[in-house]
């Protein structure tokens, strides 16, 4: 599987709280809609590419919209949240890695894992890396402690 990771971002909230919110993505959608005016224009543009429902996250990708469902079996409480694509031309996982820090903050990294045919990799690796970066930035902007 190919992996595309965002740069690490510090989130001003403990990992267990973030984990509990990320396993209920509809809370995130509600907060984004309620506080969209607090985000800069670049962040608001990212909102158009990601949608959160009760148990899934949909992302606009180079391959079209991909819907990812929460994978409780591969998630690890307080450490990792995994979403898996159920209907996709290639297997896709979205992994949110959480690393608790001593000061009740969390270092987070968004990761897209895909099983790509060799000939497709060069065509989509740039947009997929950018997608991982944007999702990592979006996560860092969510006020998890207020959800």
Image (spheres, rainbow, N blue to C red):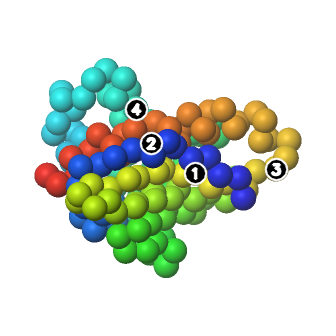
In front of the other: label 2 or label 3? 2
Residue 117: assigned label: 3
Q: Residue 106: x and y, percent?
A: 32, 56
Task: Check the image and name the residue furthest to the bottom.
Answer: 73
Answer with the quarter of the image where residue 80 lies. bottom left
Q: Residue 35: x and y, percent?
A: 17, 36
User: Above or below — where is 144 with respect to 33?
Assistant: below
Answer with the quarter of the image where residue 48 lies. top left
* Quarter of the figure with the N terminus: bottom right
In front of the other: label 3 or label 1? 1
User: Above or below — where is 80 with respect to 96?
Assistant: below
Spatial separation of the CA atoms under disc 2 and disc 3: 24 Å
Q: Secondary structure at mark 2?
A: helix
Using the rendered image of the protein, determine whether residue 70 is visible from the camera's viewpoint.
no
Discs 2, 1 touching: Cβ within 8 Å: yes
Which of 7 and 110 lies nearest the eye of the viewer? 7
Q: Residues within 10 Å of mark 3 (few under 14, many from 20)?
A: few
Task: Check the image and name the residue furthest to the right.
Answer: 119
**Residue with the mark numbered 2:** 135
Q: Residues within 10 Å of mark 4 (few under 14, many from 20)?
A: some
Q: Secondary structure at mark 4?
A: helix
Residue visible at 24% across and 29% down in the picture: 39
Which of 53 and 8 lies nearest the eye of the viewer? 8
Using the rendered image of the protein, determine whether residue 79 is visible from the camera's viewpoint.
yes
Residue 112: assigned label: 1
Task: Check the image and name the residue furthest to the top.
Answer: 41
């Amino acid at each position: 599987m190919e992996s595309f990771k965002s740069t690490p971002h510090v989130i001003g909230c403990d990992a267990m709280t973030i984990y509990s919110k990320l396993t209920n993505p509809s809370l995130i959608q509600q907060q984004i809609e309620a506080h969209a005016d607090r985000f800069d224009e670049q962040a608001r543009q990212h909102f158009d590419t990601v949608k959160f429902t009760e148990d899934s996250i949909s992302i606009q990708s180079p391959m079209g919209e991909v819907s990812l469902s929460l994978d409780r079996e591969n998630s690890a409480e307080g450490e990792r949240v995994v979403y898996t694509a159920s209907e996709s031309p290639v297997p896709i996982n979205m992994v949110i890695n959480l690393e608790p820090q001593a000061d009740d903050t969390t270092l987070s990294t968004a990761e897209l894992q895909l099983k790509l045919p060799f000939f497709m990799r060069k065509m989509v690796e740039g947009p997929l890396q950018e997608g991982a970066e944007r999702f990592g930035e979006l996560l860092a902007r969510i006020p998890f402690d207020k959800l």
